[in-house]
Image (spheres, helix red, strand yellow):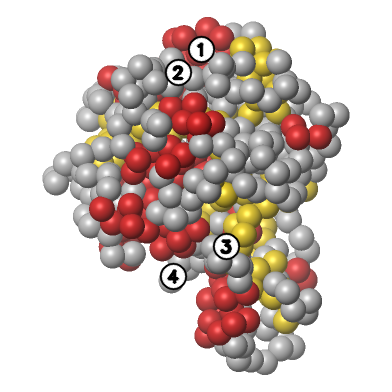
């Protein structure tokens, strides 16, 4: 969980622009038709499209976004992997406009949105074959979210998100939601932080979207230091969570094996960690052999039988899902790729591209404008933790990162075979291919079979 150096691949500034101002009114690209319908509000009138075309569309969305948390952290601290869309047109907005036969709207920086602008629960459940499980599984399971600092509006914002999408109440009063500090206190909480509040809202909403019946435990570290975040992980497990999501990370260091045994070695608990948002390169704690490292994809609607298609998320040479061969962590016994003699990142993946991002409701601080669209592997980590929760409690001595490997190459995983997240000397470290690859691991969930003990 060590942090970046000046030459690290981490986001070094708060604003990261994608595309141009002209590109903010993106084009609809219809799969298999080879044509684009441009959505420029100044020059294009509304048009109707057929149901077949809508089903086949793949949004080519151009967005601007910013890192939700602070710039590159100082030594000994981690950064979150949440990216908030601040301008342009998302894939969800393109999809909705096509369904209505109208010109897509655009997101304006820091402007309040009346309605969601990203994928919601039905989209996530559809994309990953989870609709039936989401309606019937998860009761009695607790997914823990570990983040830094306090989000004073966490419970209220969660209520708004769940109400909008017709999900059951998840409150302190009914026992579904709880918020504690890294010491387990419900009253002595950390100081508040606007950027991390956005991360917290993203995490809570992704658990809700994926496992609506799950209880949610939010554990807030008093700072983003390696030790405090790790202590918060331990507290989550102490309080009974069998599924723990960590949407943060930093450069590897020789201390990581110590962090492994101190914070992340919890047999019988499914611990997930974001692979990072800065393109090809290994990040910790995703490099821990005790966690499920979660990469990121671009998720688009498709005319195929699944209704969706995915590729490696890459926005630019420095923006995209992380991956790579660890410099320090030993290779776990269940990982069998031959190009990396140590721990390889990632294991599995889920949606992370901000252009095909997810809907989040957040009202705290300068970033809290209400409905937002978020991306980054901060979205994919809690999604995968929640899939584990839908699949049921892990074996008491198991390290659940092994489970997807037991289902490798089967229909339980959507193999992602296109795209890359940078340049590397060993192709599969950074380039998707049939079977295992670094950016997407063995692929994305197709139901629960890859996330339960065999």
Instruction: Give the farthest residue toward the left.
Output: 173
Helix, strand or loop status at disc 2: helix
Helix, strand or loop status at disc 4: loop
Place of residue 288 in the rendered image (x, y in percent of width and height, measured from the top left): 55, 20
Q: Which of the marked residues, 2 or 1, is nearer the chain's N terminus?
A: 1
Give the distance between the C-alpha atoms of the residues marked 4 and 2, in whole angstroms: 38 Å
Place of residue 267 in the rendered image (x, y in percent of width and height, measured from the top left): 38, 18
Q: Which of the marked residues, 3 or 1, is nearer the chain's N terminus?
A: 1
Residue 181 is left or right of residue 81, and the answer is left
Give the distance between the C-alpha atoms of the residues marked 3 and 4, in whole angstroms: 23 Å
Tag of residue 264 = 2
Residue ID for mark 4: 115
Foreground of the two, 323 or 251:
323
Tag of residue 259 = 1
Residue ID for mark 3: 308
Foreground of the two, 113 or 432:
432
User: Residue shown at 60%/67% (left/top)?
Assistant: 304
């Amino acid at each position: 969980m060590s942090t970046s150096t000046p030459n690290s691949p981490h986001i070094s500034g708060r604003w990261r622009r994608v595309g141009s101002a002209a590109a903010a009114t993106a084009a609809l690209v219809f799969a298999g038709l080879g044509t684009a319908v441009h959505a420029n509000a100044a020059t294009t009138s509304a048009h109707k499209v057929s149901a077949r075309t809508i089903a086949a569309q793949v949004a080519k969305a151009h967005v601007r976004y910013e890192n939700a948390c602070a710039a590159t952290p100082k030594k000994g601290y981690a950064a979150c992997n949440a990216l908030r869309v601040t301008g342009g047109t998302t894939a969800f907005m393109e999809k909705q406009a096509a369904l209505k036969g109208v010109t897509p709207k655009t997101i304006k920086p820091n402007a309040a949105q009346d309605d969601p602008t990203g994928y919601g629960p039905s989209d996530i459940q559809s994309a990953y074959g989870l609709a039936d499980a989401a309606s019937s599984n998860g009761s009695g399971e607790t997914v823990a979210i570990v983040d830094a600092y306090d989000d004073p509006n966490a419970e209220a914002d969660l209520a708004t998100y769940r109400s909008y999408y017709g999900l059951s109440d998840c409150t302190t009063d009914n026992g579904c939601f709880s918020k504690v500090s890294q010491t387990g206190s419900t009253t002595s909480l950390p100081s508040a932080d606007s950027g991390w509040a956005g991360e917290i809202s993203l995490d809570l909403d992704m658990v809700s979207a994926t496992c609506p019946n799950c209880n949610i435990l939010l554990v807030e570290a008093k700072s983003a230091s390696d030790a405090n975040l790790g202590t918060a992980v331990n507290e989550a497990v102490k309080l009974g969570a069998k599924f723990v999501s960590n949407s943060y990370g930093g450069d590897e260091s020789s201390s990581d094996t110590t962090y492994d045994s101190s914070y992340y070695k919890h047999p019988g608990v499914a611990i997930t960690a974001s692979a990072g948002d800065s393109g090809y390169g290994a990040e910790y704690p995703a490099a821990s052999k005790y966690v499920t490292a979660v990469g990121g994809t671009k998720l688009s609607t498709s005319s195929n039988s699944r209704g969706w298609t995915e590729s490696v998320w890459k926005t630019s040479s420095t923006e995209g899902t992380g991956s790579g061969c660890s410099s320090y962590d030993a290779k776990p016994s269940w990982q069998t790729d031959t190009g990396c003699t140590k721990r390889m990142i990632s294991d599995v993946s889920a949606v992370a591209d901000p252009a095909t991002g997810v809907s989040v409701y957040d009202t705290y601080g300068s970033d809290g404008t209400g409905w937002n669209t978020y991306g980054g592997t901060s979205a994919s980590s809690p999604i995968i933790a929640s899939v584990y929760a839908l699949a049921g409690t892990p074996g008491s001595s198991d390290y659940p990162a092994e489970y997807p490997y037991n289902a490798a190459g089967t229909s339980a995983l959507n193999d992602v075979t296109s795209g890359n997240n940078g340049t590397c000397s060993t192709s599969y470290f950074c380039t998707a291919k049939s079977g295992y690859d670094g950016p997407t691991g063995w692929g994305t969930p197709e139901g629960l079979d890859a996330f339960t003990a065999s």
